[in-house]
Each structure stands twice: as structure tokens, then as C-alpha cells.
Amino acid sequence: MERTLPAATGFLAAVHQDGGRAPAPVFASLGSCALEREERHGHTLHTGLLHTGAPEAARAYGPRCAVVFAGELYNQAELRSLLPPGAGPDGDAQLVRALFDIYDLHAFRLLNGRFAALVQGEGRVLLATDHAGSVPLYLTAAPGRVLAATEAKALRTAPTGRPLPAARPVRRLPGVHQVPAGTVLEVALDTGGCTAHRTWAPPLSRRILPEDEAVAAVRRALEHAVQVRMGPEAPLVVLSGGIDSSSVAALAAGRAAGPVDTVSMGTDEADEFPQARVVAAHLQTAHRELTIPTDDLLRRLPHTVWAAESLDPDIIEYLLPLTALYLRLGGTGRRILTGYGADIPLGGMHREDRLPALDTALAHDMETFDGLNEMSPVLSGIGGHWSTHPYWDREVLDVLVPLEAGLKRRYGQDKWVLRAAMGDVLPQETVLRPKLGVHEGSGTTSSFSRLLTAAGVPQGRVHHAKRLVVQELFDQVVVAGRHPDEVATEEVVQLAAGQLESRTQPIS
């Protein structure tokens, strides 16, 4: 029977030459944890799989290698066509193992998915992320051992590893590094030496297409991305009433056998409920509205940092309302589709009429998204759900990113090519509605800022204070291992305000 959620949503794995031990698995994401120990090629492989009922489908063993896999693939049919006739591996981990037997690490250049993977071969360990690094992956390595996990906090008690120039060090976790997006890190077990192999990079060139061809290409790519993420049951779509989420809802509704579920989130300060209702009524979805009091929203700041493991205050601000929503949903684990991330390849947040400036901003955003963790499945995983983002499908990005800027800003509209592509399935007022970020539509930005000014932070120092708050939260819930329920947002804000004041005091 086809599963609604991936076989595994996270893992902790350790490969030792001397038998060794792995730390106890610690995850923010909910789920069952299956532990296994396997002796291979003279080394010991320990795995702790965070799973949804079928952990065996997230592990694969063969003569050449063992595969540990969290997440899911979206191009299984194409990948299976590369295998010998009659070969029909069961599950994504088995499929990756079969491809690895043929292509070695180059197999990861073939995959379109949302995943993190570990491959143990003879004398080496490979750690791989999907093209966008949308399932973060961390490691620590030293001669004779490699440990890897999909959450950095799972490695906080691991033995200190050696510096790895090919990966990004994690704040205040010595020897812990993050695998870059679209990369396979190849670690030699005997030395701990590490080599990076890029498997995807955002296109830098730009394509010139007639309007109708560009519109058709965007519609076709997005339609396929939604289709392959649907699962066996009708998904839940997060709906704000903007063009991004409404497009995903419309395409999901067009593919589903029955009504699609949609949900909108607001606060007592602001919401986008009227705009979302227009789309829900048009698509005849089973729609739900959740109002989260602003005080409750701000109390979820520690949970957001705990899940995202990000130090960027803007990203945490974007993710806070989504985290609060996922925690409020309740019920059994759902497959959730979002419109999140469309602004990055389409330049939607910049509201820039000058095409050179728009393309410069877009190129910068595509170059610097890595490590922000804004697509991390742990955000929904702390509520027991699995989220996936069609706009960051590899094939969608390969269509959207290279479109010349004039197709993204045209006739005075941002994201014109997307609006034109979806004009036949959405209400006109939705297609024409100006961009509003989820953090704006929910009042998150203003309420977070007000919390800081109430603590005495000058208006001109608010953004810096937000950075201090996020750093302190990271140090408490990731580095120190505190549960976010034990961390009071107000106390951290007061601490950050005090730090800021002490740094601005004149020296007597």
C-alpha cells in the first residue's frame, strides 16, 4: 500500500572502524525511531531512523554499498528506466542503491527529490543532499569515524571531528558541519579527509522566450511538480490567497479525486482570511481558518529556531507563522503542500521595476539560500506532518530561474509569468493581487518588532536585536539541547536588549 508520508523523515547514522557507538538519537521532528547495527566492509554502521511505520523502506543493503535515506524522490519512473529490464527496487532507498551500483556518486545528479542520504561503501562514506538542500544534513568526521544526522542537535554530544573546508561549520558545535545544497561529500574513512562533488547549481544564464512559450513551460513544470507530490490521499494545502499558494491549491484540486483540504493562518493582529476564502470557494476546497493569538505566536520563536536550526532573523520571521500553524494543526500526520519559496526564483519580494536590479537580486538570492534551512521538513515535522514545496522542485527551478527578468516583471506586475500561467484556473482578483509575505499578512514582523521596542530597543536597532534573539535561542535549543517549551521568549528578548544596551554604553 502506498504511504502518505515518506518511509523516513530523518536519521542519525554513524560509521566506525572500531565498532564504536552512536549518540542517542535526538530529533525535534515527531515519529518513531528504529535503531539498527550492521557490520559491513570491516566497519560498523549504526542507524537511527525517524520513520512513519516502515523503516525497512528507508534502508537498503547490497554488495557494494548500504544506503540510509530520509525523504522522497519525485522522478522514480525516469530513474527506474535506467535500470536493467526486470529490476524493480522497492522504495527510494533501494532505487538509490541500484543506481549507485551503476553510476556511483554520479547517481545523485539524476535525482529530483527532497532528501538527505548516507551511502557507506568500501573505505568511504558519501553524504548527499538534494539540489536545494531542503532536507538539511550535518556531519562530524575524523579518522576512523563519520557521524551524520538530519538535525544538528543530534550531533551535539558526538566526539569532536576535524575541520572540513568543503562544508559549513555550525555555530558553537565544534567539528559539526552542514553538507552544502546539491552536493555529495565523499569522506575517506581512514583519514577523515573530505571531497565535495556538486550535483546541481542554480543556472546563471538567462533564456529569452516568447510570452506564450514561457507561460506554457511554467504551467507544465509546476503542474508536474504538484502532481508528483500529491500522495495517495488528498493533501492539505496552506492557502494565503496569494498567487503562489493559490496556484498550488488550484493544481492540486485539479488532480485530486475529491475535495482538497486547505488551511489559512492568521493572528488577532492580522490575517488574509477574506482573500483565501475567495480561492477556497472558487476551488470548492474543504477550507479551515486558524487564528493564533499574537502572544502564542511569539512563544513559538524558540520552536521555530529549534526546527529550522537557522541563525538568520529574517528567515526565522518568515517561518514563525508556519511553525505555529503546523503545531496547531493536530491530528495524524498529513502531507502538506505549500507555495513557499516562489519569491526566490521569481524575484517576488523585491518589487523592483528596474530589470538589471531585479536580476541582480534574484541571482544573489539563488546564490545565498544555502544553509538558511527555510525549506526544512522539521518545521512541519515538529507537528508530525510532512511538508513539500513544488516551487523548489528541481525541474521547476530549472525553468523559473533562467527566465529573463522581463518575464518576471512585466506590465507593472511582479511574477508576471506565473500569474499568466495560472490565469485560467484562479479568480481574476487572485491573479492580480499584489504580493504580501506570510510574515506580513499575519502581523508577525510588526508584533516581533513591538516586543523588542517594548523591551527598550531603539527602533533603529530592532533588526540587530532580532539577530541577537535568534542567536541566543539557537545557543539554548540547539547547542545546549534545551527543549523550546522550557525557553521563554520574553526572557530571551530582555537578555538581547541588555546585550545591545551594554554594547552601546560609552566607555568612561
Image: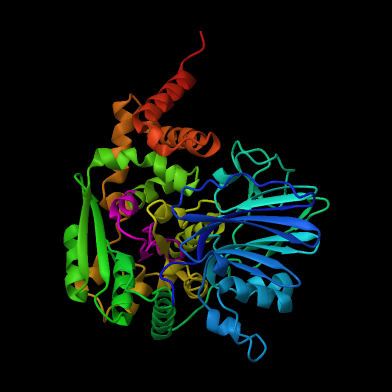
- Residue range in magenta is 324-353
Q: Quadrant of residue 287?
A: bottom left
Q: Position of residue 356 (x, y in %)?
A: 48, 63
Examine the structure image and report whether residue 365 is included in the region drawn in magenta.
no
Of 360 and 437, nearer the camera is: 437
Quarter of the picture containing the N terminus is bottom left
Q: Is residue 77 above or below residue 471?
A: below
Q: Residue furthest right?
A: 190
Q: How many marks?
A: 0
Q: Quadrant of residue 352?
A: bottom left
Of 60 and 342, nearer the camera is: 60
Q: Tell me which residue sits at (31%, 79%) in the image.
A: 256
Q: Position of residue 141 (x, y in %)?
A: 72, 48
Q: Is residue 47 above or below residue 471?
A: below
Q: Position of residue 112 (x, y in %)?
A: 55, 73
Q: Tell me which residue sits at (18%, 74%) in the image.
A: 282
Q: Is residue 352 above or below residue 411?
A: above
The reply, left or right, for residue 189 in relation to residue 252 is right
Q: Residue furthest top?
A: 508
Q: Quadrant of residue 248?
A: bottom left
- Is residue 212 something one can see in this rendering? yes
Examine the structure image and report whether residue 327 is included in the region drawn in magenta.
yes
- Is residue 135 something one can see in this rendering? no
Of 38 and 156, nearer the camera is: 38
Q: How is the image coloured?
A: rainbow
Q: Position of residue 96 (x, y in %)?
A: 63, 73
The reply, left or right, for residue 490 in relation to residue 3 is left
